[in-house]
Amino acid sequence: MITNTIAVKAVVERNIIFFKRDWVILLAGFVEPIFWLIAIGFGLSTFVDDVVVDGVPIEYTQFVVPGLIATSALNAAAFDSTFNFFFKLSHLKIYDAMLTTPMTIGNIVLGEVAWSVLRATVYSGGFLALAAAFGYIPSWWGVLILPLSALIGFTISAVGIFSTTFVRNWHDFDYFGLAIQLLFIGSATFYPITVYPTWVQWLVNLTPLYHGVALCRELALGTIELSDLWHVAAMLITMGIFGLWAKARLQSKLLR
């Protein structure tokens, strides 16, 4: 019986080997942040006044960039745990083949999540380094954005894999695209959550990306507080619940 560590490593290595041949797809994740920084830093920010955070006005670019780092992790993790996962699950039947080995459903879920987390962390790390070079990460607390990006990737991957187990065909991914866009725009990435009505703020607080965006911003600005542990707890709870649900759903699909 292979150990969990070896099994998870094998799943991650399989993805690495695959993307060695399609490295251009991975490169796109590094190029996109450059366009965002140009568009926000040298374009939109010149037309937008400073944003007040905790009573302190900051440049609009400094407000937006930490949120974009969080959404970079979202995009990487969501792509791998939805589109790619569905292709391997329903068309390539890779997981059926894996289960003919000593691997378990839990190994597969952890392996795919680990790969999504790795990709999310690399993308966010590249964006973080670029933003820091431009001076948009004024606090040394910003170095903690990197492990936070891994947590965001872990949470989004768990939700993505669970949701993908309900997908019937490629047309269903239209709903996924809409959901990702709503998360991207509505998770206080481009404006404070206080602009929403109270009931909408409650809904936003139920989404995992908002907690990642809020915590990235606090770390980047150095305004971190003990109460921010709530954001970490919210993501950990979401990750645990959806991870277990994803495992149960895969068992019902692959072991029937």
Image (cartoon, grey):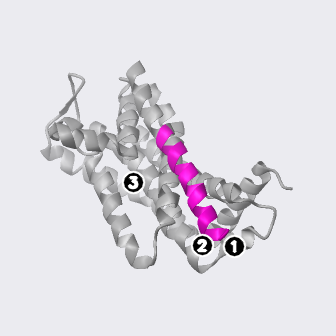
Residue at 73% x, 73% y is 97
**Residue receiving disc 1:** 96
Where is residue 22? Give x, y as percent.
58, 72
Label 2: which secondary element? helix
> Do labels 1 and 3 touch, CB within 8 Å?
no
Q: Can you identify the residue that label 2 sits on?
A: 88
Q: Is residue 15 left or right of residue 203?
A: right
Above or below: residue 248 compared with residue 133: below
Choose top left, top right, bottom left or bottom right for residue 200.
Answer: top left
2 or 3: mark nearer the eye? 2
The answer to whether marks 1 and 2 mark residues whose Cβ atoms lie closer than 8 Å is no
**Up-down: is 3 above or below 50?**
below
Bounds of the magenta segment:
237-256
Circle 1 Cα neighbour tier, 10 Å, few/some/many (<14 / 14–19 / ≥20): some
Q: Is residue 150 left or right of residue 101?
A: left
Q: Earlier in the sequence, mark 1 or mark 2?
A: 2
Measuring 48% from the left and 45% from the top, which residue is drawn there?
Answer: 152
Which badge, 2 or 3, is on the more N-terminal residue?
3
Q: Can you give x and y, in whole percent of width and height, for residue 117 in the image?
A: 56, 50
Q: Which percent across, then down, holds residue 64?
A: 29, 42
> Which one is closest to the eye, mark 1 or mark 2?
1
Amino acid bearing label 2: Lys
Nearest to N terminus: mark 1 or mark 3: 3
Q: What residue is at 46 percent from the left and 71 percent from the top?
A: 167
User: Which disc is residue 33 wearing?
Assistant: 3
Residue 134 shows in this picture: no
Query: Residue type at mark 3?
Result: Pro
Identify the amino acid type marked 1. Answer: Asp
Q: Nearer the viewer, residue 219 or 185?
A: 185
Q: Where the N terminus falls, by quadrant?
A: bottom right
Q: Residue at x 47, y 36 (%)?
A: 145
